[in-house]
Image (cartoon, grey):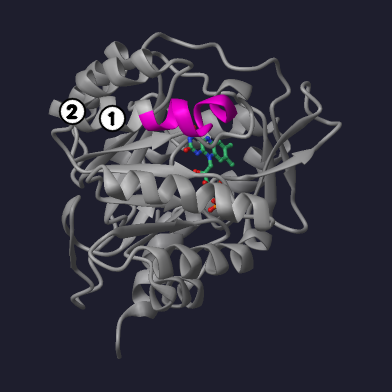
Amino acid sequence: MTRSDLYSLAKPILFRLEAERAHALGLKLMGWLPEVKPSGADLGIRTSIGELANPIGLAGGFDKTGLHLRALSRLGFGYLVAGTITLQPWPGNPKPRVVRNVRERTLVNSLGFPNPGVDEFLRNLSSSKPTVPVVASISGREVAEIVECYEKVQPSVAAVEVNLSSPNTQRLRDLRETDLFQSLAVDLSSAKKKPTFLKVPPLLDERQFEDVLRMVGIWENHGFEGVTACNSRPVTEPRLATGAGGYSGPPLFANLILAVKKIRMKTPKPFEINAVGGVSGPENVKEALAAGATTVQLYTALVYEGPRLVSRILNELTPH
Ligand SMILES: Cc1cc2nc3c(=O)[nH]c(=O)nc-3n(C[C@H](O)[C@H](O)[C@H](O)COP(=O)(O)O)c2cc1C
């Protein structure tokens, strides 16, 4: 059975299930899929993460446990972001905490980092044996907690993404305040052994533009390799238990391009920008790279388009 047969059978069942359950089942089913055949064209790039077969990464949050990285690395991605994980296990927010808007192909989530904690994540990572570079996404409530998680995770991954931008955790907004953010950047830079990215919130108005660009400037000054822009957009959503969450999918794309251009203007290459938010096809990938991104990442499109998405994009990026 081909990959597309399997997914067209599974999709109607998965989409009838509650979104978070469907995701867990979808991850298990991915283990059954055959490996994507490389397109043959050379889409490889060299980044601080390493030599990547192509510039498309899986965005943070898809595999929060590290258990499914082997299966995900067979879908054609150039690299995978795993997590977000924290020093200790976290239960996350009350359910329901993920809802779909099927017609517009978007999601809203208020997960709040449910994850098994860094120690179990590292065990899962070593048993899952991914075949492409893994970037660990980490976060926490306190500077010391994030730094300890950073120290533990670095030896086992190609790079680290520090997520200070989930819309579902109030404490992260505090860590973005200048003083705390400065001390986080100082402490991380003295513990740094691997390329490290900052995942920033979306730049939705002038004030946020300034705040994010200020953080990016501090980040670059401390010698970090780049940023991942942007996380999901904060919205109210009465179907979620918390009443609010992060919106993701194609409507984020226009704002992503603006963000990439602004960040690129402030930070010339080789500072790296991983562009994420609404990427769902080859045209998006080309546009993000042309705007100044080093790589792109995607999440929501994979939910709606299924596991063939990355190989389809790669085939269309291939010069014929
Ligand atoms: C259900 C869900 C869970 C997510 N969890 C995380 C997370 O744990 N860490 C993170 O950095 N981003 C997380 N994100 C945000 C994505 O990585 C990405 O930044 C955002 O969804 C925009 O990209 P997209 O439009 O391709 O989905 C999550 C997104 C979704 C939809």
Q: Is residue 314 magenta?
A: no
Residue 164 on image: x %, y %? 48, 33
Local SS, label 1: helix
Q: Is residue 174 magenta?
A: yes
The picture quadrant where one finds residue 273 is bottom left
Do tag 1 and tag 2 residues touch (Cβ < 8 Å)?
yes
Q: Decide if residue 15 is on the left or right side of residue 285.
A: right
The picture quadrant where one finds residue 39 is bottom left
Q: Quadrant of the C terminus?
A: bottom left
Residue 136 on image: x %, y %? 31, 33
Question: Residue sitting at 18 percent across and 44 percent down?
Answer: 131
Q: Mark 1 — residue?
A: 186
Q: 10 Å neighbourhood of mark 1: few (<14), some, or many (≥20)?
A: some
Residue 261 on image: x %, y %? 48, 70
Q: Is residue 225 above or below residue 125?
A: below
Magenta residues?
172-182
Q: 10 Å neighbourhood of mark 2: few (<14), some, or many (≥20)?
A: few
Which residue is nearer to you in this view: 108 or 221? 221
Residue 34 visible in the current orientation: no
Q: Is residue 206 above or below residue 152?
A: below
Residue 199 on image: x %, y %? 44, 43
Outermost residue to the front: 179
